[in-house]
Image (cartoon, grey):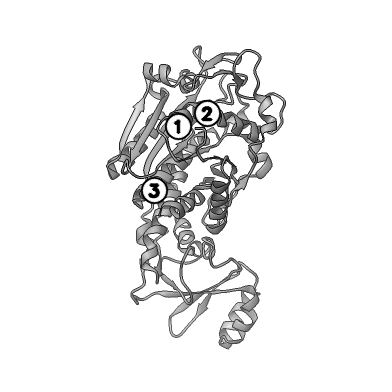
Amino acid sequence: MTDFAALLQPDRGQPARTIEVVHPDAYEEWLKGQPKRTRALLAANKVTGKAGNKAILPRDGEEWSALLVCDEDVSSPWRIASQPGFLSEGTYRLKEGEVGAAGLGWLLAQYRFDRYTKADKDSGPRVLLSNDPAGIDETVRLAEATALVRDLVNTGSSDMGPAELEAEAEKLAKKHHATVTVTRGDALTKGYPMIDAVGRAAAKHRAPRLIELEWGNPKHPRIAVIGKGVCFDSGGLDIKPASGMRLMKKDMGGAAHALALAQLVIAARLPLRLHLLIPAVENAISADAFRPGDVLNTRKGLTVENTNTDAEGRLVLGDALTKAGEDKPELVIDFATLTGAARVALGPDLPATFVNDETLATDLLAAGTAVHDPLWRLPLWDGYDEYLKSDIADLINAPDNGYAGAVTAALFLRRFAPEGVPWAHLDTFAWRPTAKNARPKGGESYGLRACWAMLKGRYG
């Protein structure tokens, strides 16, 4: 992983080149104050003061500074995110103002996923000096958590199965003296029958399991963070077409988000009792695969008629939610790459967010807006609960009417969420289909910083 801590340093007056950030509305006035040769250079390079314009400006002797015309709010992490890719390696400082949230974009612009390729030897570090030393650690932790999501999601499924997710939890636990418990085999079959059913068709070395990590003082408020860990989703016997299977290495994106949020909580020593749960499976095809029409037992005691083996994520989450509720948390958050319907409705950037508590919903949405990690609330609409009725079991896992797919998936999960406990379900994409500054195409965190900001506001 990129050494983000080396890229954001306290400003102690060390030599550095200057980055001038000018708003488009102030560009003409700024231009009037520049030397003639600077104005000529900008004109020659067709810099007009439009947002996104960049240039290198000559200064005294061999010195130079960088210009960025930017209309991003000063609270945006992406305000100077275009600069590391534009500038040569070296040390820089902003001419005016605090680095603030923009430090995150600076760091993430230098993120690289190079597990399967050789690193670019010509790409040296771009160091930014910050006049807010106290904020550096938090910014670095956010960058590391985001990079963790990206790395895990970008990794091919051959190298990211249930065992590898378990290893990630063990790594986090070892670093911070947390405890990991893994349930597999007969104990999983008896205790978590839906997790077992979904994962039992996979090869032995990719056997299903429930991974749990606990950290913190038992006297502190207990929260549960759950992540869907479907390490590859073929669709099961309701097999996906090739186009739908292409990106299914990312179907463990919920687990990646949950691990990253746990990392943030632990690294910041938030006064919580953290319970991380990851149902880790591969939805494979074999003679032992669960079938359409099977009636599944659940940890909660309900029976589920399986109407679609490609609606497996809600099954494994159901058992994990039940387990989380048994330990009496005061708050539950789950992340899942759950439905295509959420993406059709909201696109890749907005996690469909379902919340059963108005205070929690308000806090989450406000936090997302404040940190530029937006969420979009969808309803837990009681009127669609009838879509989950079964003729032979307590409920089905997936209606076949094609209506409100993200909502009915959330309503299914609600049957297993602990009653009376604030619960948020984020149906997130975990993938960026088109690159933006500091946000390359590939695995991506959506809703992670919003949830962290909410937790920090409540418990920090």
In the displayed structure, 352 sits above or below 67; it is above
Other residues around mark 1 within 10 Å, as few (<14) / some (14–19) / many (≥20) = some
- Foreground residue, 149 or 407? 407
In the displayed structure, 143 sits above or below 87; it is above
Other residues around mark 2 within 10 Å, as few (<14) / some (14–19) / many (≥20) = many
- Determine which of the numbered discs, if any, sits on residue 42 in the image: none
Q: Residue at x 46, y 29 (%)?
A: 320
What is the x, y in percent for residue 109? 48, 57
The answer, for residue 160, to whether it is visible in the render is: no
The residue to which callout 3 is attached is 265
- Foreground residue, 2 or 260? 260
Q: Do the CB atoms of the residues marked 3 and 2 lie less than 8 Å apart?
A: no
The residue to which callout 1 is attached is 325
At label 1, the amino acid type is: Gly
At label 2, the amino acid type is: Phe
Q: Do the CB atoms of the residues marked 2 and 1 lie less than 8 Å apart?
A: yes
The furthest residue to the front: 420
Identify the mark nearer the N-term, 3 or 2: 3
Q: Do the CB atoms of the residues marked 1 and 3 lie less than 8 Å apart?
A: no
